[in-house]
Amino acid sequence: MKILTTFYRRMILFEYPLNQQIPVLRSRLPVNIAILTERDLDAYNRYRPDQSMKEIRARLARGDRCFACWYDDRIVDAGWVATGRVYIPYLRRRLILGSGDIYNYDAYTLPAYRGLGIFMARISYVGRYNQQEGYSRGLALVAVENKAPRVILYKSGVRPIGLYSCLRLGPWQWEWRLPWGKDALLSISKT
């Protein structure tokens, strides 16, 4: 599969409407959900030591927000939210969001804390938070080969609305979109 995805990549676009009542979900672990700040970067580095602090600072500088779940003074789950033009490394393209859209990415729960409903509690919180800010829908892209997140998204009421695909041969790349309904998919661009 790794060889195939070097040349041919597919991602499913999921949509979560924010213009409806969003249920309040709680995890089985009493976590505190807060937006990451500059003073939290050391804790984030302990939570995700595999990530570059330069990249995390760049995310914060461009206005991306990280919603972190804290338990016993440490981050155990977090996910990022962006608006505008969002770079998708897997496709090597930017997704051009509408004014009412937010894009959810890089969600991760520490292995010891999975299965406790923390992710679902955070998604519920993020949805309500962004709804209050006037956003009308949340979006997420998941690689077709990445089955675990797809299962969680289906359970959370998020619906797939289309497929982005790309084919790479050396320096060339071709991409196409396939909507799974009547609505057109968001545009993507090189820059």
Image (cartoon, rainbow, N blue to C red):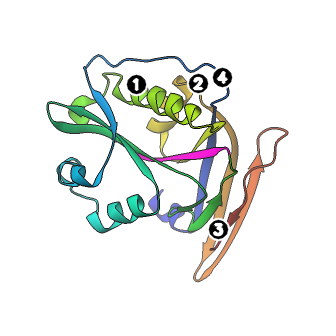
The answer for how far apart the CA atoms under marks 1 and 2 are is 13 Å
Location of residue 86 with respect to 124 vertically, above or below = below
Kindly identify which residue carries mark 2.
Answer: 157
Mark 1: amino acid = Ala
Task: Look at discs 1 and 4 and give the one toward the viewer.
Answer: 4
Q: Which residue is mark 4?
A: 20
Kind of residue at badge 4: Gln
Q: Looking at the rendering, in which quadrant would you find the C terminus?
A: bottom right
| Residue in the picture at 24% in, 34% down | 70
Q: Assign a secondary structure to mark 3.
A: strand
Dominant SS type (magenta): strand
User: x, y (%) of residue 57?
Assistant: 33, 63
Q: Is residue 151 left or right of residue 56?
A: right
The percent position of residue 94, horizontal first and vertical second, equals 61, 64
The answer to whether residue 187 is left or right of residue 21 is: right
User: Mark 2 or mark 4, which has the lower sequence index?
Assistant: 4
Q: Which residue is mark 3?
A: 167
Q: Point out the tag, 1 or 3, that comes first from the N-terminus.
A: 1
Q: CA distance from mark 4 to mark 3?
A: 37 Å
Which of discs 2 and 4 lies nearer the camera? The answer is 4
SS of the residue under disc 1? helix
Farthest residue, direction right: 182
Question: CA–CA distance between discs 2 and 4?
Answer: 12 Å
Give the farthest residue toward the front: 133
Residue 32 in percent (x, y) is at 28, 28
Q: How far separated are the C-alphas under marks 1 and 3? A: 36 Å
N-term mark: 3 or 2: 2
Please name which of the two marks, 4 or 3, marks the residue nearer to the observer. 4
**Relative to 92, is 187 above or below?**
above
Q: Which mark is residue 121?
A: 1
Report if the CB atoms under discs 4 and 3 are less than 8 Å apart. no
Specify start and end residues of the magenta stretch as a single range: 100-109
